[in-house]
Image: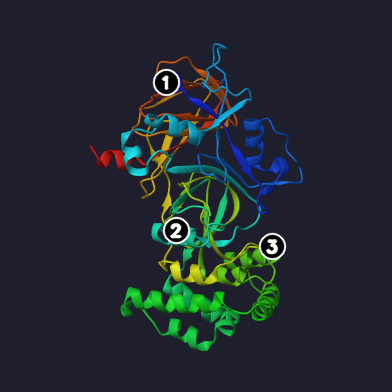
Amino acid sequence: MDSTPSQKNLLRLRCLVQNYDWGLKGHDSRVARLYARNSGSEIRPDSPYAELWMGTHQSGPSFVVHAPRASNGVSVDVDDDDDDDVGVSLKKWISENPNVLGDKVLHNWGCDLPFLFKVLSVAKALSIQAHPNKELARALHKARPDLYKDDNHKPEMALAITEFEALCGFISLEELKGVLCNVPEIVELVGSGYANQILHINEQDGEEKVKSVLRSIFTQLMSASKEMITKVLSNVKSRLQIESQVRKLTDKELLVLRLEKQYPADVGVISAFFFNYVKLNPGEALYLGADELHAYVSGECIECMATSDNVVRAGLTPKLRDVKTLCSMLTYKQGFPEILQGVPLNSYVRRYLPPFDEFEVDQCILPRGASTVFPAVSGPSIFLVMAGEGIMHAGSSKGEVVTEGDVLFAPANTEISIESESELQLYRAGVNDRLFQASL
């Protein structure tokens, strides 16, 4: 297949949706609205729409769409012989046109996109989870390919579109001591021996000793019997309801009561006391390395990650749990996560750079009648139009009309210019610029 004419053009993508149970339902879900615009599908009002996937992962691949609209009404073909509106998968098209990735990306990751781009619409908490590092991912995939679908690690970043809540990493040692003093049900669950290890240790004992003690008490907590968890959560719920009559409950206590309604008798509810409770405002982001524990709680976000779907779960889920693997793999780092505000590139674009080579995300908010340029970069990009309408040009090619729900692939070394016809909000995912700067 000769795809040379398309290699410097924007490719429109048809993307897939994941209907996980925790997603917002019907038209309340931004994922649903974007997916409907992207695919032409009807929104089912009672169905959850959790994630829109943009990329090449086999669990939710994107496809190249025939005849993208051009501003002059001329079609842009992708040279596929099928008669359907959707042509080849993006992964197949890239494999047949590997130069669209750029030399550095090809050298580092082979003939595939190194990142997976998503939109999430979260109605209720996702599982207490972590994503394995590369070595563990290879072992898990080899042992259980039915559960762990690939052999890659999965560092990720969530960029809030709305107010967004998450549990992320372990609270500090001093905060944890406070929890054991103020939440007696946890001591009842794990036993006074484990609790006393935390209460009697301090930072001067060394980071590895603190991590070892934290690993022990957390593993004990997550391994508790269903009967004990049910009893302890009932006691927590009763105590907090009584105490709410005489004092204002903390944000964490209110969250625990919310989680208990979503996941009754689940160990993930009581374990929430161990984690940082993060509230992101729109435009703020947090990132998570491999083996870092987290659970998204509510809100909508852009998410980007290495191309993987490996998840090890241990709570707040009806899915299979692997408590032993989760508790053994975690880093047990303590303290509040870094919140990214984005670095302004110009008046309209902010860049979010996590410490991972595979990806970065740009946010562009373009007022009506304004224009901006995304300079050519040495790797591929995916653009998502979140809202509004405009015209997008690849290099000197004729412009294409883009509107809400459009997803476009831009090859490496392609300058992209955009003009807005109404306020335009879009996001770009690409390979982390630090990778290319380091090779200069």
The residue tagged with tag 1: helix, strand or loop? helix
Residue type at tag 2: Ala
In the rendered view, does 165 fall on the left or right side of 348?
Answer: right
**Residue shown at 49% from the left, 34% from the top:** 92
- Looking at the picture, does residue 255 appear above or below residue 76? below
Relative placement, left or right, of 198 versus 42 is: left
Residue 4's label in the rendered image is: 1
- Based on the displayed image, in which of its 4 quarters is residue 403 positioned? top right
- On the image, the x and y values in percent for residue 412 come to 38, 30
Real-space Cα separation, disc 1 to disc 3, in angstroms: 52 Å
Residue at (37, 49) in percent of width and height: 356
Q: Nearer the viewer, residue 245 or 174?
A: 174
Q: Residue beneath label 3, please?
A: 262
> Which structural element holds mark 2?
helix
**Left or right: where does residue 388 sit relative to residue 427?**
right
Marks 2 and 3 sit apart, C-alpha to C-alpha, by: 30 Å
Q: Are marks 1 and 3 in contact (CB under 8 Å)?
A: no
Which one is in front in this view, the residue at disc 1 or the one at disc 3? Answer: 1
- Amino acid type at circle 1 is Thr
Residue at x 51%, y 39% (from the top left corner): 55
Judged left or right of residue 123, residue 215 is left
Q: Which residue is under mark 2?
A: 137
Could you tell me residue 81's position as x and y percent? 56, 22
